[in-house]
C-alpha cells in the first residue's frame, strides 16, 4: 500500500484521501502523545496530545459546549497522520494546509457529526491561540508581544509518560464524545 501509512492499530490509512472508516481515536491519541510541540525545539518534551488536553479542559472551564470541548481535543488530530508543522512555516505551505483542512473536516465529520460552525471554529481558535501564548512562553521562553491571556484552568508543563497522556486523551474523548 504505497500511498498509505500503517497506524498504531494496524489500519492502512491514506491521509491524502481520508475516509471515516480509516480513523481510529486510539491511533489519534497514541500518535499525539508521542509528537512533540514546537517541532521538538522546546525546553522539555511536551506533546501535542498534552496541548490538546489543555485546550479541551480550558474549553470546559470556560463553559463551552460539549461539542466545542471535543473539537478542542481534536483540533490537532490531523497531525496524528500528517505530523506537526510549526505555525510560522505552515503559512507558506498551501498544499499542506489543504490536506490538513480536508483531513480535519473528515475528523470533525466522524467524531462531531459535522464540520465546525464559524462560531465554534472561532472559539477553538481563541483557546488554541491563548494556550499557544503559554506554550511559547513556557516551552520556548519566547513570550508573544501581546499580554498574557486570562485562563480558566491551571495547567502544567511537566513531562508525562506518553501512555499516561494517551489514556488521559482517551478518557476525555469518552467523557465528551457526542452519543
Image: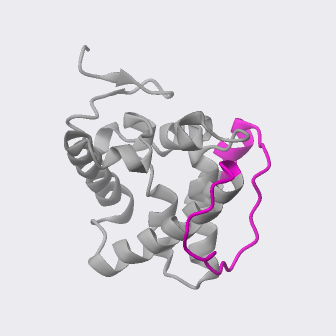
Position of 150 compared to 71: left or right?
right
Q: Quadrant of the C terminus?
A: bottom left
Quadrant in which the N terminus is drawn: top left
Residue toward you, 73 or 140: 140
Magenta span main SS: loop
Q: Residue at x 76, y 38 (%)?
A: 161
Q: Is residue 179 magenta?
A: no
Q: Quadrant of residue 68?
A: bottom left
> Which residue shows up at 32% across the image and 52% down it?
104
* Colour convention: one colour
Q: Quadrant of residue 51?
A: bottom right
Where residue 126 appears, x then y in whole percent? 46, 74
Quarter of the view holding residue 92: top left
Q: Is residue 56 left or right of residue 120?
A: right
Which residue is nearer to you in this view: 142 or 9?
A: 142
Q: Looking at the image, which residue sits at the far front? A: 145
- Residue 101 image position (x, y, % from top left): 26, 52
Residue in the image at 44% along x and 27% along y: 7
Residues shaded magenta = 139-168
Q: Is residue 177 left or right of residue 166?
A: left
Amino acid at each position: 500500500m504505497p500511498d498509505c501509512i500503517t497506524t498504531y492499530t494496524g489500519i492502512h490509512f491514506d491521509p491524502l484521501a481520508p475516509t471515516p472508516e480509516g480513523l481510529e481515536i486510539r491511533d489519534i491519541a497514541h500518535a499525539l502523545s508521542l509528537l512533540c510541540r514546537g517541532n521538538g525545539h522546546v525546553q522539555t518534551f511536551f506533546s501535542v496530545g498534552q496541548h490538546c488536553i489543555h485546550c479541551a479542559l480550558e474549553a470546559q472551564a470556560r463553559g463551552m459546549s460539549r461539542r466545542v470541548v471535543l473539537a478542542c481535543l481534536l483540533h490537532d488530530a490531523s497531525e496524528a497522520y500528517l505530523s506537526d508543522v510549526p505555525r510560522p512555516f505552515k503559512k507558506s505551505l498551501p498544499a499542506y494546509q489543504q490536506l490538513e483542512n480536508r483531513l480535519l473536516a473528515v475528523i470533525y465529520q466522524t467524531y462531531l457529526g459535522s464540520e465546525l460552525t464559524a462560531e465554534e471554529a472561532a472559539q477553538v481558535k481563541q483557546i488554541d491561540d491563548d494556550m499557544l501564548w503559554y506554550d511559547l512562553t513556557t516551552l520556548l521562553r519566547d513570550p508573544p508581544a501581546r499580554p498574557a491571556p486570562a485562563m480558566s484552568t491551571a495547567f502544567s508543563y511537566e513531562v508525562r509518560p506518553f501512555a499516561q497522556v494517551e489514556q488521559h486523551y482517551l478518557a476525555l474523548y469518552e467523557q465528551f464524545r457526542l452519543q
